[in-house]
Image (cartoon, grey):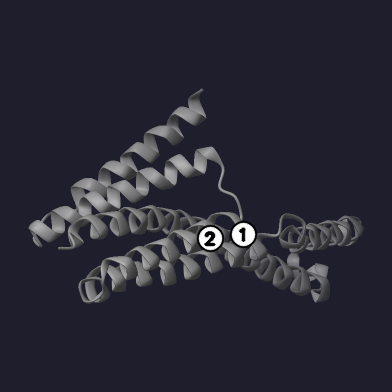
């Protein structure tokens, strides 16, 4: 008789690995998307300021004839800064990195769905040989995800941060499953306090 629990545990381990990597790519996607939106907002605001200053009469801004040339020079400098900021995305590939991390999240979500469907819906209706073939197929897909797809690499530091966030999320999820009325602010506040302390240390030392 086939022991389905052994295969379920094997699939669950594989699913958990990919789930952790998906969370890491998700964090990176949110980070780069936030950076991209922030740069875009800064460029739009500064561009509007430059446009207004360029057509404004210096006398309206209480700038007399002696400082008019300096005023125009500052507008030119500000316009150049806006130009440099607009190139940041091209230089650092912020949107491109965000798109690659987003694609990684989508691919890994599809894989997790396949694992979940096999583990919960299909497994018990399959014979042992068919189960082994399906699990081998999952491992092949897992290898493809890790080695063949052009996903951006995650630095060791970001990997450790992402793993910590993931484990905290899993821990909170387990607590909520046991008790839906669990106060999760206690756990999230700890994380923000830790970040604040780290930021303060960075300023002092």
Instruction: Residue 19: give its label.
Output: none
Q: Mark 1 — residue?
A: 148
Q: Is residue 133 left or right of residue 8?
A: right
**Mark 1 Cα-neighbour bin, 10 Å: few <14, some 14–19, many ≥20:** few
Q: Is residue 47 left or right of residue 166?
A: right
Pinpoint residue 172: horizontal percent, then vertical percent.
Answer: 21, 52
Q: Residue at x 35, y 63 (%)?
A: 132
Mark 1, secondary structure of its residue: loop
Whole-angstrom CA distance, mark 1 to mark 2, is 6 Å
Q: Quadrant of residue 82?
A: bottom right
Check if mark 1's residue and mark 2's residue have beta carbons within 8 Å: yes
> In this orientation, which residue lies closer to the viewer: 51 or 124?
124
Q: Residue at x 82, y 71 (%)?
A: 54
Pinpoint residue 52: horizontal percent, then vertical percent.
Answer: 75, 74
Q: Mark 2 — residue?
A: 145
> In this orientation, which residue lies closer to the viewer: 184 or 176?
176
Q: Is residue 84 left or right of residue 125?
A: right
Pinpoint residue 144: horizontal percent, then vertical percent.
Answer: 55, 60
Quarter of the image with the N terminus in it: bottom left
| Above or below, comparing residue 67 to residue 194 in the picture | below
> In this orientation, which residue lies closer to the viewer: 174 or 186?
174
| Above or below, comparing residue 76 to residue 124 in the picture | above
Q: Quadrant of residue 6?
A: bottom left
Mark 2, secondary structure of its residue: helix
Disc count in the image? 2
**Mark 2 Cα-neighbour bin, 10 Å: few <14, some 14–19, many ≥20:** some
Pinpoint residue 55: horizontal percent, then vertical percent.
Answer: 82, 76
Q: Residue at x 50, y 30 (%)?
A: 202
Q: Residue at x 27, y 42 (%)?
A: 190
């Amino acid at each position: 008789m086939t022991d389905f629990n052994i295969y379920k545990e094997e699939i669950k381990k594989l699913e958990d690995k990919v789930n952790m990597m998906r969370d890491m790519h998700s964090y990176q996607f949110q980070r780069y998307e936030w950076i991209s939106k922030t740069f875009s907002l800064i460029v739009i605001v500064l561009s509007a300021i430059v446009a207004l200053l360029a057509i404004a009469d210096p006398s309206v801004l209480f700038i007399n004839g002696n400082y008019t040339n300096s005023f125009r020079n500052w507008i030119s400098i500000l316009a150049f800064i806006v130009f440099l900021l607009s190139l940041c995305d091209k230089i650092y590939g912020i949107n491109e990195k965000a798109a690659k991390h987003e694609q990684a999240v989508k691919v890994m979500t599809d894989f997790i769905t396949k694992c979940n469907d096999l583990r919960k819906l299909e497994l018990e209706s399959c014979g042992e040989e068919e189960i082994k073939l399906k699990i081998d197929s999952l491992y092949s897909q897992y290898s493809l995800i890790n080695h063949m797809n052009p996903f951006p690499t995650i630095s060791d530091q970001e990997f450790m941060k992402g793993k910590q966030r993931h484990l905290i999320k899993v821990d909170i999820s387990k607590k909520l499953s046991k008790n839906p009325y669990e106060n999760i602010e206690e756990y999230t506040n700890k994380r923000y306090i830790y970040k604040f302390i780290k930021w303060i240390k960075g300023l002092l030392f």
